Image (cartoon, grey):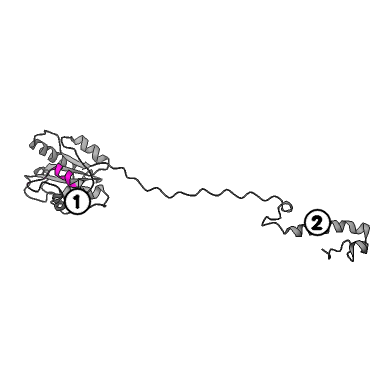
Amino acid sequence: MAAGATMLDFHTRGRKKSTGAEMRKRQQDQSGGTDAYDLQRAWATYKEVVVIRNGKYWADLIKDRGRGWFVSIDVWYAEIPAAIRCQSNGNIGHTMGVAPETHSDGRWLVSDPLCTGYKWVKPSDLRRAMEAWGKRIGIGSAINYTTAQEVAIVEPKPPPIDPPKPPEPPCPPCPDCPECPDCPDVYEIIRARDREWIAHLTPSYGRVPGAQWGDARWGDDSWM
């Protein structure tokens, strides 16, 4: 059950944690040993699903682990090398957790509930121990292991990005668009035009009759 607790932590990316004792308490069988079905019932209380792969073969485990899955394996502990066992008596059926990480020399990262922390173990040692357990329980060269139901991780969608605003239409020439911000005041435009017209007429007509224009002169725009 302790290996199943480690698998739960891995499968949920740390969102759900447990212990072997807590797993044992969460399933119905409180006497004797536990098996994959007990683990499956315990996981259901966390709203997670254990996939039981009993009777499969080594090639199946290679494929599942290659998907990046954590697997809990059943072994005959005596077949695990004594140097990496954490209990002198190996004559027991035992469950260990195998992470998807692989050492540069090919060894696999293994969580043994009888040990403290993880250990690097040769895959060949694990296979031998698993197949030895299979022979003892009458399934020949088949093996027993469990993994977690594959769940698609849905990443949160980024907030929608407002489309860029279309550029403002360009202003027409200023005389036709006096309200444009870059254009001079409309009255300045009109006065400039009148000044040009006055300057054009002054040499030809001189002074404007007072009855019509008062004191203003052609060429004198002080009246504007």
Marks 2 and 1 in Cβ contact (< 8 Å) = no
- Circle 1 Cα neighbour tier, 10 Å, few/some/many (<14 / 14–19 / ≥20): some
What secondary structure is marked by label 1? strand
Q: Residue at x 8, y 46 (%)?
A: 33
Is residue 69 visible in the rendered structure shown here?
yes
Asked where in the image residue 199 lies, by quadrant, the reply is: bottom right
Reply above or below: 66 against 208: above
Q: Which of 130 and 154 is in front in this view?
A: 154
Helix, strand or loop: magenta stretch: helix
Query: What label does residue 85 carry, if any?
Result: none
Position of residue 5 measured from the top left corner of the image (x, y, whole percent): 19, 50
Q: In this view, does 31 lie to the left or right of 207?
A: left
Position of residue 165 measured from the top left corner of the image (x, y, whole percent): 55, 49
Position of residue 178 measured from the top left corner of the image (x, y, whole percent): 71, 55
Specify start and end residues of the magenta stretch as a single range.
32-42
Q: Mark 2 points at which residue?
A: 193
Q: Is residue 63 magenta?
A: no
Query: Nearer the N terminus, badge 2 or badge 1?
Result: 1
Q: Name the residue under label 1.
A: 118
Q: Residue at x 87, y 56 (%)?
A: 200
Q: Which of 150 and 211 is in front in this view?
A: 211
- Circle 2 Cα neighbour tier, 10 Å, few/some/many (<14 / 14–19 / ≥20): few
Q: In this view, does 195 lie to the left or right of 93?
A: right
Position of residue 46 measured from the top left corner of the image (x, y, whole percent): 22, 49
Q: Which of 153 and 73 is in front in this view?
A: 153
Q: Which of 80 and 59 is in front in this view?
A: 59
Q: Which residue is drawn at 73% across and 51% down?
A: 176
